[in-house]
């Protein structure tokens, strides 16, 4: 039997639907972030500016974070040696979990190899340990949360996105049985924020347990970077907070934080944790450095919000269709898969700007977009260049503007490469 043809057919189907994804070959540069070197297929290279990184605060480039990784690797080696059940727990992970528990005001934390795995493991394990549990899951939850819900044997119901009335109907109908509300604080494709205080109040009223995904908010919001729940003053009212180390903290890994007994039960029962090799100590040390740093750097969060505000304002003033929201995510709507890919390609090839197209199944068909994520390292000059390039692409491809473009007024502010004084010095 020709097995290969089944895989060829699957790939062809994606190509015919204009959903086949091509990865840009990029080499980031510490001293010039958010710039990178694009390695073309023909063997040549080109400098580009990255506008879609989830390293939202540039922590992956920060000297203190890099130093922690290098120093730890030099002392204890590159790998972890195996699972924590067999090889023991590295001191670096113990320190990291202590910092994360403190960040969220919880008794304990547990680190996983990724945020995807932490959601898969924690949601399914919690639901299976609760007898006759009903999972109530937001309709816009991330794939990792959906997979965690599916992996569980528990009954599940979906409530309409951020719809408190629908959620309350489901809670009331469930009666006295155990209930687990699973939702995100910040939904990364639209950039909208959940009514976390109101959901916490409903959970308390109907005796439900709460599980929140803060992956796009940790490091970014709150006085110490604890996320949307810290900003809203409800961290103590959420049972389990899940986060990532790969976005605001710029490294790798996922985690959960909560009551010590809950965390211990997940540690003891979750197969995805038990049978997975632990994070290398060097990665854990780098993440710890980033968490500690951001607890004391509200100025970086302020700089990030300022860059986001200016970017949104400039794109909107140019008549580009920015999807409004209250977060740092800047979706620019294209609403057609082939055009979205063409816009991304033209930005890269003509203007040296990298923004990955977001198509189905990440977003619904007809809502394709370019998802822009400013950082504190994007200067006014970067923003001016971005907007001018996007106006050119929109005109060239005939993509609809919201209104006729206006003359662009954005003060370049600074020609420096980054807002980190340490990196400025290194770049000079």
Image (cartoon, rainbow, N blue to C red):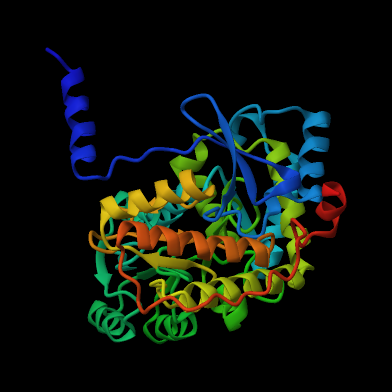
Give coordinates of residue 155: x percent, y percent: 24, 62
52 left or right, relative to 189: right
State the residue lying farthest toward the left: 1
User: Residue at horizontal 74%, vertical 56%?
Assistant: 417
Q: Is residue 259 visible?
A: no
Q: Residue at x 74, y 63 (%)?
A: 294
Relative depth, front residue between 395 and 108: 395
Viewer-proximal residue among 239 and 38: 38
Q: Give the image location of residue 233, x and y in percent.
A: 61, 83
Along the line of sight, which residue is nearer the eye, 333 or 250?
Answer: 333
Q: How many callouts does the rendering have? A: 0
* Residue 386, image quadrant: bottom right
Quadrant in the picture for residue 107: bottom right
243 displayed left or right of 357: right
Left or right: where does residue 387 sit relative to residue 321? right
x and y percentages locating residue 410 in the rendered image: 62, 74
Q: Position of residue 20 (x, y in %)?
A: 29, 40
Residue 243, visible in the rendered structure? yes
Q: Is 204 left or right of 30, judged from the image as shown?
A: left
Judge by depth and name the residue closer to the eye, 179 or 320.
Answer: 320
């Amino acid at each position: 039997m020709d097995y290969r043809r089944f895989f060829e057919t699957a790939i062809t189907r994606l190509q015919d639907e204009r959903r086949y994804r091509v990865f840009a070959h990029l080499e980031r540069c510490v001293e010039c972030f958010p710039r990178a070197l694009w390695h073309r297929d023909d063997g040549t290279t080109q400098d580009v500016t990255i506008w879609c990184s989830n390293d939202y605060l540039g922590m992956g480039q920060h000297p203190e974070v890099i130093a922690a990784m290098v120093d730890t690797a030099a002392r204890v080696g590159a790998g972890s040696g195996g699972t924590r059940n067999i090889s023991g727990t590295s001191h670096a992970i113990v320190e990291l979990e202590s910092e994360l528990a403190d960040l969220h005001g919880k008794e304990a934390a547990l680190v996983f190899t990724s945020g995807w795995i932490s959601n898969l493991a924690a949601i399914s394990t919690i639901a299976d340990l609760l007898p006759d549990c009903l999972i109530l899951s937001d309709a816009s939850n991330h794939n990792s949360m959906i997979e965690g819900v599916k992996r569980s044997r528990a009954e599940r119901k979906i409530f309409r996105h951020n719809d408190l009335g629908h959620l309350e109907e489901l809670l009331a109908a469930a009666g006295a049985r155990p209930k687990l509300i699973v939702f995100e604080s910040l939904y990364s494709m639209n950039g909208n924020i959940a009514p976390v205080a109101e959901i916490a109040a409903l959970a308390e009223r109907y005796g439900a347990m709460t599980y929140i995904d803060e992956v796009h908010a940790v490091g970014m919001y709150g006085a110490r970077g604890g996320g949307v729940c810290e900003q809203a003053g409800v961290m103590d009212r959420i049972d389990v907070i899940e986060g990532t180390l790969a976005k605001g903290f710029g490294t790798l890994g996922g985690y959960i934080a909560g009551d010590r007994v809950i965390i211990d039960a997940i540690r003891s029962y979750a197969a995805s944790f038990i049978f997975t090799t632990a994070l290398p100590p060097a990665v854990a040390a780098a993440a710890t450095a980033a968490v500690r740093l951001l607890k004391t750097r509200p100025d970086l969060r302020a700089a990030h919000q300022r860059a986001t505000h200016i970017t949104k304002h400039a794109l909107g003033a140019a008549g580009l269709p920015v999807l409004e929201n209250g977060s740092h995510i800047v979706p620019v709507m294209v609403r057609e898969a082939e055009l979205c890919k063409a816009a991304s390609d033209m930005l890269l090839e003509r203007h040296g700007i990298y923004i990955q197209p977001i198509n189905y199944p990440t977003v619904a068909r007809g809502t394709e977009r370019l998802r822009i994520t400013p950082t504190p390292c994007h200067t006014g000059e970067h923003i001016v260049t971005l907007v001018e390039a996007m106006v050119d692409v929109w005109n060239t491809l005939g993509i609809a503007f919201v209104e006729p473009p206006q003359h662009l007024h954005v003060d370049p502010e600074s020609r420096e490469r980054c807002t980190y004084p340490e990196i400025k010095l290194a770049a000079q």
